[in-house]
Amino acid sequence: MDQYRHFDELVNLEQGTIAREIFVDEDIYNQELEKVFTRAWLFVGHESQVPEPGDFFTSRMGTESVILTRDFENKIHVLLNNCTHRGMKVCLYDEGNSATFTCPFHAWSFAPDGKLVGVPHENELYSHVLEKDKWALIEVAKMENYKGSIWATWDKTAPDFFTYLGSAKAHLDLALDSLDGSEGGTEVFGGVHKWISPCNWKVPAENFCGDSYHNPSHISVDMIGIGPSAGQGEKGRRDNELADAQHVWVSFPGGHGIHSALKPENNAYIESYKDNPIVEEYYRHCYEERQKRLGDDARLVPFVGTIFPNTSYHGRQPRALCAWHPNGPESAEIWRFFLVDKGAPKEVKDMLRRYYMRYSGPAGMTEQDDMENWNYATAGSRGTIANRLPYNYQQSQNIHKINDPVPGLVSTQMTEENARQYYKCWSSYMQDKSWDEIMSHPAQVKDERI
Amino acid sequence: MNEIKPSKLERNIDYFTLRQEVEEFLYDEAETLDQREFSAWLEMLSEDLTYFMPLRRNVKYGDHAERENTREGEDISWFEEDKWTLSKRVDQIFTEKHWAEEPLSRVCHMISNVQLLSAAPNVASAEEVTSKCRFLIYQNRVETESYFFVGKRTDTLRKEAGDWKLLRREIILDQNVLLAKNLTVFF
């Protein structure tokens, strides 16, 4: 039980402090792989990456390789990419189409639904012994295809995906729905950014769950202007679409944290994407359509968020889903999938693609500076003397409302509440708490599930 | 699409003379970058520049020519940009607030295996020339960070008012998961 009390001391919400060791300690990291990553819902990929039967996309859950497949009955599966005979990867490709996955080691072969369908010399060598149906590729316990985004968990006792998301769903929707407000309709561009960043995986997850205080990281891009109207001389790293909006920082049971914004009642369109009149016109049109379709609900517009534990989204400028894969205590393997409306005109897709590339990832002018800070903040969690002082998470402590003006634990000023709740939830996982307990923080928030 | 066939140009005195001109340009450019003369480097780029670096994927043999690299004009890549964007990258360094390059990294470009692929209208009096080379770029950052970027480049130079300018650069980095936290170096 001592080990459990330990986590309450490491994440001390009363004081608003978090111990540095949770970002560097090897033992804590190894426990996370078991206690967090085998239980929580993880983002795997997008159905648009496997449009045809036999299509596959190789992804990752925690530190382990998985294959997202579409079988010949059009059903999507998420399978551990690990031969049940000797552990070799049965798929070494990033993507493709195949009727079977044949292990290169001893040639056991598996169908896209995971079933073991071929064993060399089966009759002579395994007669009456091998029960092939018991040796399928390990499949996730639960999978959800939510508006094209594929999520999975290894825990059959986990709450269903919508219970898990709770009211964070309305915010994730802002990234997954079409710009005109119709449900879903998004796809991912070909090409997934994958890179190794020397930071603990929780550092960027926290960064995206509502750390809007880190703006000084991006002063250089804000000075020079790289947004979709930068060619017209606009400064900043994005258009100022939220200029008249009330920003909201919201945390939810299950540890999710988001930063969105509520436009004023008149919900006026703010001209953006000025570098290309076709794109500007498209966004204006979609904005008006969305308002007609959703009415007052259209006032909610996205910024960023993290779905616990390691999936984050950018909602609009840019627009992407990102997984911060654990890769050792001081290393993350980061995968980013860029979203776009399936039906957007070519000009819009091209402009967005180019904007996404100059904004995000290791070649992105904005995120490069994040990467530098995540790197050395992780390294700074290591020192013996440094470790005597925990990190300060007191920003806007005890300043929040419940379900006002949106469902959840809400702050209308910049806050570290989302981070506090994120780590509170993390500490619940680390203490092996039940799903009921995990889903009961923040306690005051009555979840209004849809 | 991205793997250009070995050079078929005849090896004669015109070829070697032109190759030497191209090499001189590429070495000058590398020197300019390694000396952090970023504004001077921008001067070496055509206003019509395309600067492209695809992602590299693991795909089945036989699919590699078509599917190994992400497509220019269609997919997400590492870079698909123009001179405006590269100028922004230089401006960003000049703000002194670009934390990923503040303080500046120590960067060393090595260029080798230069071969000419094509020249127009001809090798003897070229106005435009496409060459291929290998690059090995070493980046050392802050105290002990170091990264190696190794791959192939296909460069098109165009003569503008008597000077060679870089018109098109395609960078084939030989990595799948990027092994560096950032791509702040110019290739």
Image: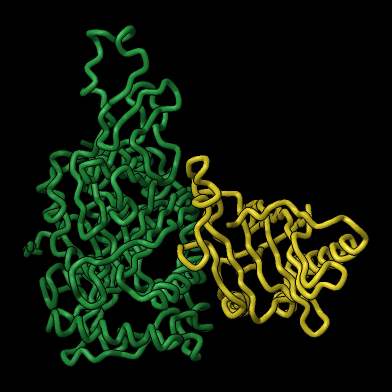
Figure check: A418 above or below A239: above
Residue A235 in the image: x percent, y percent?
Answer: 47, 86
Tell me, yes or no, if residue A4 can be seen here.
no
Tell me: A62 left or right of A12: right
Figure check: A118 above or below B137: above
In the image, B116 versus B142, the foreground residue is B116
Placement of the N terminus of chain A among the 4 image quadrants: top left
Which residue is at 67% across, 57% downward? Answer: B139
| Total numbered labels | 0
Tell me: A213 left or right of A128: right
Residue A34 in the image: x percent, y percent?
Answer: 29, 37
Q: Who's yellow, chain-wise?
A: B
Tell me, yes or no, if residue B183 can be seen here.
yes
Which residue is at 87% across, 61% downward? Answer: B15
Residue A341 in the image: x percent, y percent?
Answer: 30, 70
Q: Who's green, chain-wise?
A: A
Placement of the C terminus of chain A among the 4 image quadrants: bottom left
Residue A37 in the image: x percent, y percent?
Answer: 29, 43
